[in-house]
Image (spheres, helix red, strand yellow):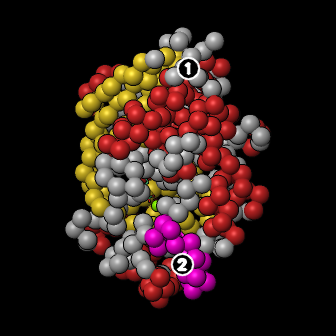
């Protein structure tokens, strides 16, 4: 019987093609943890931990993930080497929080389990609606706040993405960088699907400011208020005509249900790392699909490892809006896997089993800053 015998943590440092600034900080490089689960047959499964190096997007951060994986999560798997992703998922429930660390390990185990069985991740996730799985997904792009805070620099950057074929533009906003940049982009591209993301930068009293962007025909405004303020989002949703979409707030199926019940959100950004894995991500997708709530797949500047799995998830039928599933070259000159390339504004769902891609050993070795092997 297949067992997980060894787990290797790979910490890599990937230079970004340009700095990425949001309301919670600026990244110049991406410090990422990859988890490799190695079976008794020698098959490797891969998962990406989407935590940032500092706790700015949520409370998780890479050093904390290394600790909780090494001390708490990996031992729950290696104590008997279970290779069953559902069993691992059940064991992880007893560790509170830490969804990004859990997702990385769960995905590595799931990937190995699927590879041994020759099943694609997307076919496993979409097993209930096999005939509705897409072969390719519509892609959007997330555009940071230019470090210069120059609108002409913003328009240059957006223009490059429009020329590349992206089907939706998302602008990062914060107080002081909102109405004017959004107006400028809308005037330049009157028909482009356009949305904003505040990453919690506003307060309950900013309703008028956010309503000032209603005339720009935005698809949605993402996470304007703090993560824990569902009622604040519900009140704001009544004050503005732009639909509110929650990202950071949606940390589980139960919270998604509550947010929908109080009408704090009318669209949901699904990020597997934020909700504790692809299994839970599918449950939130199914809930939203039953309720007629559109969902889209968020991103966290993933390498090809996380991107491959996200493109598979985004191929499920409820993902009716373009996601932040951009091409590899949006962030990286060199990806750790063969690159994802945009074709007519879409990415192709991998056809190989599991997540469908592997890190290229020489590139992985070059990017690695630290690694650890944990054995049974
Ligand atoms: O809020 O969606 C977000 C990146 C890092 C952390 C949070 C977010 C983002 C993005 C970029 O918007 C998404 C991507 O292109 O991967
Ligand atoms: Mg967001």
Residue at mark 1: C-beta within 8 A of ligand 1: no
Which quarter of the rendering shows the N terminus? top right
Front residue of this view, candidates 90 and 368: 90
- Magenta stretch: includes residue 322: no
Q: Residue at x 58, y 42 (%)?
A: 93
Residue 233 rendering spot, x and y as whole percentages? 55, 75
Q: Which mark is residue 80?
A: 1
Horizontally, residue 366 falls left or right of residue 337, namely left
Residue 222 rendering spot, x and y as whole percentages? 50, 67
**Cβ atoms under marks 1 and 2 closer than 8 Å:** no
The image quadrant where one finds ligand 1 is bottom left
| First to last magenta residue range | 220-241
- Magenta stretch: includes residue 231: yes
Task: Tell me, yes or no, if residue 160 can be seen here.
Answer: no
Quarter occupied by residue 333: top left
Q: Residue at x 77, y 40 (%)?
A: 128
Residue 291 lies, with reference to residue 272, above or below; the image says below
Q: Which mark is residue 232?
A: 2
Front residue of this view, candidates 369 and 304: 369
First reached walking from the N terminus: tag 1 or tag 2: 1
Tag in front: 1 or 2: 1
Q: Helix or strand or loop: what does disc 2 sit on?
A: helix
Residue at mark 2: C-beta within 8 A of ligand 2: no
Question: In whole angstroms, how far apart are the C-alphas of marks 1 and 2?
Answer: 46 Å
């Amino acid at each position: 019987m297949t067992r997980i015998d060894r787990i290797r943590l790979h910490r890599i440092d990937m230079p970004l093609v340009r700095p990425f600034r949001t309301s919670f900080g600026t990244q110049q490089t991406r410090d990422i943890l990859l988890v490799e689960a190695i079976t008794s047959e020698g098959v490797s499964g891969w998962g990406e931990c989407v935590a940032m190096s500092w706790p700015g997007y949520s409370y998780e951060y890479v050093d904390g993930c290394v600790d909780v994986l090494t001390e708490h999560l990996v031992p729950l798997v290696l104590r008997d080497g279970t290779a069953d992703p559902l069993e691992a998922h059940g064991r992880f429930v007893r560790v509170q929080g830490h969804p990004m660390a859990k997702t990385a390990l769960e995905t590595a185990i799931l990937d190995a389990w699927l590879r041994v069985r020759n099943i694609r991740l997307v076919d496993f996730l979409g097993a209930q609606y096999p005939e509705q799985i897409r072969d390719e997904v519509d892609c959007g792009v997330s555009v940071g706040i230019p470090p210069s805070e120059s609108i002409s620099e913003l328009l240059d950057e957006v223009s490059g993405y429009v020329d590349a074929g992206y089907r939706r533009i998302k602008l990062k906003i914060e107080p002081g960088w909102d109405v004017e940049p959004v107006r400028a982009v809308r005037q330049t591209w009157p028909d482009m699907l356009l949305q904003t993301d505040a990453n919690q930068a506003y307060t309950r009293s900013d309703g008028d400011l956010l309503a000032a962007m209603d005339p720009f025909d935005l698809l949605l405004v993402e996470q304007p208020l703090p993560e824990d303020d569902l009622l604040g989002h519900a009140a704001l949703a009544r004050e503005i005509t732009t639909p509110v979409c929650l990202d950071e707030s949606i940390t589980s199926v139960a919270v998604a249900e509550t947010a929908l019940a109080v009408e704090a959100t009318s669209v949901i950004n699904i990020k597997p790392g934020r909700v504790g894995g692809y299994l839970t991500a599918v449950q939130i997708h199914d809930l939203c699909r039953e309720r007629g709530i559109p969902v889209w797949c968020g991103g966290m500047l993933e390498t090809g490892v996380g991107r491959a799995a996200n493109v598979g998830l985004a191929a499920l039928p409820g993902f009716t809006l373009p996601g932040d599933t951009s091409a590899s070259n949006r962030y990286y000159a060199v990806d750790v896997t063969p690159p994802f390339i945009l074709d007519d504004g879409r990415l192709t769902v991998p056809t190989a089993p599991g997540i469908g891609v592997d890190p290229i050993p020489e590139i992985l070795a070059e990017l690695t800053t630290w690694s650890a092997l944990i054995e049974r």
